Amino acid sequence: MAWQPGIITTDFPALPSGALADRLRAFVNRPWAYRQRYLQSAYRTAFDGYSFAGQTDSLNQGPDDALHSFVLSDFSPRSAFPEEFQRYLRDEWPAVTRAAREIERGLLVQLGVEGLLEPYAASYGHMMSANYYPPAGRAQPEGGLRLTEHPDVSLLTLFPFGPEAGFEYQDAQGAWRALAPSDRVVGFAGELLEWLTAGRIRALNHRVAPAGDGRFGERFSFSLFSLPRPGTRIERHPSAARGGVGTRIDVISVEAYIEAHLSRWL
């Protein structure tokens, strides 16, 4: 596995995405009366559920972001998700999350994050932000972005199917860099890893800009987040803090951590 500034390029070939993009597009094209049954407010579990372009109360995107997203996860029963995703969740989701766990365990060992492997094995699950950016012939979004800059709530974020054109990230000097599409699984640190390491490993600030010549064609992206399961707690090992010895152990519930993350955006 190789590090660029903030980006982890793994040795794993990108996984097949199956027909997930088609399934997501099919859901977004369903009538509003159908889609609204699956809004995040219907789930009340982490970030699970549907968000739409222009929504002001989404937990997963801002009101100026030009996309529709559906968060699938281990945290809600499969039966709670729309029919469009049932076959994917049954046949392909288990293989994706198994591969993610193998990749993430290797990364945690490589990064030397003390005291995390045991809680990761015991209490972490995954959620996927399945994102659809429809083609736009109208005026471009504010600032020319399709997704405003932000860090993720996750421990680690992976692109299991490889990154898509348009993804940009901020390097250590504050400059924005474009990440080229890849046939490898690519990942980066989220805010939870930054919290657990007391800032030794920084969360990656990133955004989505128009690809290439700026045309707003149809775009899909699928980001897999690792998070502790709802109802568990997160504990920071004392050695994580700078200065080490004598540092108290910080403990926070998953729900309080998510609320703290969202308090900066909502």
Image (cartoon, rainbow, N blue to C red):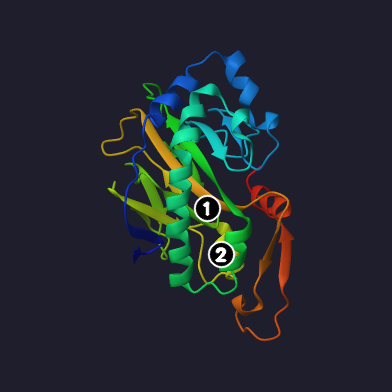
Q: Nearer the viewer, residue 257 or 48?
A: 48
Please report the residue visible at 48 percent of the width from the left and 52 percent of the height from the top: 157
Q: Quadrant of residue 48?
A: top right
Residue tagged 2 = 194
Q: Residue at label 1? A: 151
Note whether 226 is above or below 70 in the view shown. Answer: below
Q: Residue at the spot x=47%, y=17% of the render?
A: 29
**Three-letter code for the amino acid on which mark 1 is drawn:** Pro
Q: Nearer the viewer, residue 262 or 123?
A: 123
The quadrant of the rendering that contains the C terminus is top right
Q: Residue drawn 37% across and 37% down?
A: 17
Q: Residue at x 67, y 50 (%)?
A: 258
Left or right? Give the position of 202 relative to 230: left
Q: In the image, is 142 to the left or to the right of 16?
A: right
Circles 2 and 1: CB distance less than 8 Å? Answer: yes
Q: Residues within 10 Å of mark 1 (few under 14, many from 20)?
A: some
- Residue 186: give x, y in percent of width and height: 37, 53
Q: Is residue 179 visible?
A: no
Residue 142 drawn at (x, y percent): 47, 35
State which quarter of the image contains the N terminus: bottom left
- Closer to the chain start, of discs 2 and 1, is 1
